[in-house]
């Protein structure tokens, strides 16, 4: 199982103060990195899932030994076309005002028939209408397993999320934003990335660390450390290989009416 996330810290002028622990969604071990967010995505019990998914599932959520809980989905429109086998496995949920300051919404993490190019899962967005929950859309490759809510100036919520992946010898860490009103793919929502690899030319190890919020939660920062970098070959095909990254890269972001925006990217000051 992935780690239960440790209590994080809220920052007053980038000075650390305690921040409350929130039950994490257990998803199996993080294989390459340690999460840096105080996740607000939590595990979704089958009984709670039935209440949320009545308009999306035509069967109750059932647990089958050796398989994640699942339901058979209703026949819905093109907004749900990423559900290709009419089976959905809900895992976790995070609530917020994702479609407007006055809306009550729920984002359910889970999976259908996604493979590696679709990051093995997706997200179902629901919105409360009266006493029930109405499905809005489902998107493959939108992963919200480890996320914090962030309130924009208009009080609508977006998510700050993290995930890891691997392939072609690379172990990757992603820090990214999720805006449910304007959903986009990882490439266009990425805020920071760590990349650890070893190939014929270079060995590199990077780690994310030090996520810090300002007291008013209108700015935050993170560092990406390059803890190892060495050139392994002087062969001509390695000549144009990227040079060593800064030992520590400091990235700062602001919460704006349009979402999360980068303020600066610079080598971190040496301690």
Image (cartoon, grey):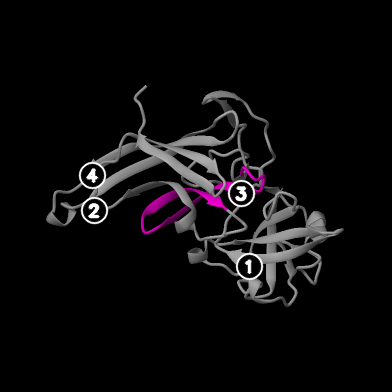
Asked if disc 1 and disc 4 are in contact, CB closer than 8 Å, the reply is: no
Tell me which label, 3 or 2, sits earlier in the chain.
Answer: 3
Height in image: 132 above or below 20?
below
User: Which numbered disc, 1 or 4, marks the residue closer to the eye?
Assistant: 4
Q: Report the number of discs.
A: 4
Name the mark nearer the viewer: 1 or 2: 1
Position in image of residue 54 (x %, y %): 81, 65
Instruction: Of the two numbered discs 1 and 2 on the same chain, state the one appearing first in sequence.
Output: 1
Please rate how many residues cluster around mark 2, counting C-alpha atoms within 10 Å: few if below 14, some from 14 to 19, many from 20: few
Q: CA distance from mark 1 to mark 2?
A: 37 Å
Q: Secondary structure at mark 2?
A: loop
Q: Earlier in the sequence, mark 4 or mark 3?
A: 3
Would residue 117 appear left or right of 97 to someone viewing this image?
A: left
The answer for how far apart the CA atoms under marks 3 and 1 are is 24 Å
Measured in 3D between alpha carbons, the distance from the residue under mark 1 to the one under mark 4, in whole angstroms, is: 41 Å
**Residue 226 occupies quadrant:** top left
- Residue 45 or 188: which is nearer the viewer? 188
Residue identifier under label 1: 112
Q: For label 3, count other residues whose C-alpha is less than 10 Å away and answer few (under 14), some (14-19) or many (20+).
A: many
Query: Residue 158, labelled with which disc?
Result: 3
Question: Where is 187 relative to 156, above or below?
Answer: below
Q: Which residues are magenta?
A: 152-178
The residue pinned by badge 2 equals: 200
- Where is mark 4, residue-wise? 243
| Residue toward you, 189 or 54 | 189
Q: Is residue 28 magenta?
A: no
Choose the circle earlier in sequence order: 1 or 4. 1
Q: Nearer the viewer, mark 4 or mark 2?
A: 4
From the viewer's perspective, is the residue at label 4 or at label 3 nearer? 3
């Amino acid at each position: 199982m992935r780690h239960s996330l440790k209590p994080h810290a809220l920052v007053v002028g980038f000075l650390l103060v305690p921040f409350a622990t929130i039950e994490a969604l257990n998803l199996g071990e993080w294989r390459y990195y340690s999460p840096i967010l105080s996740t607000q995505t939590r595990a979704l019990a089958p009984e709670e899932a039935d209440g949320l998914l009545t308009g999306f599932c035509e069967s109750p959520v059932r647990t089958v030994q050796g398989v994640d809980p699942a339901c058979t989905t209703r026949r819905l429109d093109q907004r749900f076309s990423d559900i290709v086998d009419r089976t959905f496995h809900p895992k976790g949920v995070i609530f917020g005002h994702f479609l407007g300051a006055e809306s009550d919404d729920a984002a359910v993490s889970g999976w259908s028939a996604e493979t590696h190019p679709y990051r093995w899962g997706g997200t179902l967005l629901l919105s409360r209408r009266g006493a029930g929950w109405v499905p809005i859309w489902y998107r493959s490759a939108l992963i919200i397993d480890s996320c914090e809510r962030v309130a924009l100036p208009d009080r609508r919520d977006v998510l700050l999320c993290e995930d890891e992946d691997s392939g072609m010898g690379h172990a990757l860490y992603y820090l990214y934003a999720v805006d449910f009103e304007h959903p986009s793919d990882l490439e266009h929502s990425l805020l920071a990335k760590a990349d650890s690899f070893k190939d014929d030319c270079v060995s590199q190890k990077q780690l994310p660390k030090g996520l810090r919020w300002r007291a008013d939660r209108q700015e935050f920062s993170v560092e990406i450390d390059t803890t190892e970098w060495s050139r392994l070959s002087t062969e001509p095909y390695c000549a144009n290989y990227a040079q060593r990254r800064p030992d520590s890269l400091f990235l700062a972001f602001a919460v704006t009416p349009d979402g999360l925006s980068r303020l600066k990217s610079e080598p971190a000051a040496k301690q």
